[in-house]
Amino acid sequence: MAWSCCSQLLCCVCAAKRTKCIVPLLKQAKRAILLSGTPALNRPEELYTQIHALHPKLFPNHHEFGMRYCAGQKASFGQGWDFKGSSHLRELHVLLRKYMLIRREKAQVLEQLPAKVNDTSGATAALVRGSVSTCALMCLLCVCCVVYSAAAR
């Protein structure tokens, strides 16, 4: 299974719904590839769901990952933990490169890419007009993936 724009697994208000939909599909797939120009927009915490979906044994515990790579600290007023920082980034980078990260720059792949195609489908047009939310479109995509996955078996 290939999933494009994998950074969206955590970067919007409806990420929990999207994550609950996509991650089980990724875990069931024989092979999974997450594609993104920007896998994490701001901090290491945003990578955890993607890493765990592809390689759960690498970092099996979110709390331990947060403490090690997100400069985890007790939140104010005893409200759990704050993982909004970053720490041990070189170590994290080495682990990601070793186990899952394949980085290709535009210059390396530009000749291999097909020509751009403008999508004029109704779904894209509705999204541009704002009549369909991104979340609704992604949920529709998730349903299509589930149906396709079930039909393929």
Image (cartoon, rainbow, N blue to C red):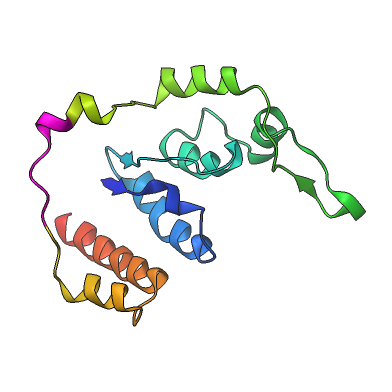
Answer left or right for 153 relative to 85: left
Answer left or right for 77 relative to 91: right
Quarter containing the C terminus: bottom left
Residue at image x 23%, y 70%? 124
Observer-nearest of 28 and 50: 50
Residue at image x 30%, y 78%? 129
Answer left or right for 137 relative to 96: left
Q: State yes or no: residue 111 in magenta.
A: yes
Position of residue 49 measured from the top left corner of the image (x, y, whole percent)? 51, 44
Which quadrant of the figure has residue 119?
A: bottom left
Position of residue 4 measured from the top left corner of the image (x, y, whole percent)? 30, 48
Which quadrant of the figure has residue 84?
A: top right
Is residue 90 positioned above or below 24 on the image?
Answer: above
| Chain part drawn in magenta | 110-117
Residue lying furthest right: 77
Residue at image x 41%, y 69%? 135
Observer-nearest of 73 and 150: 73
Residue at image x 41%, y 60%? 21
Residue lying furthest bottom: 131
Magenta region, main secondary structure: loop
Q: State yes or no: residue 12 in magenta.
A: no
Answer left or right for 138 relative to 59: left
Position of residue 54 measured from the top left corner of the image (x, y, whole percent)? 41, 37
Is residue 8 positioned above or below 65 on the image?
Answer: below
Position of residue 22 measured from the top left corner of the image (x, y, whole percent)? 39, 55
Quarter containing the N terminus: top left
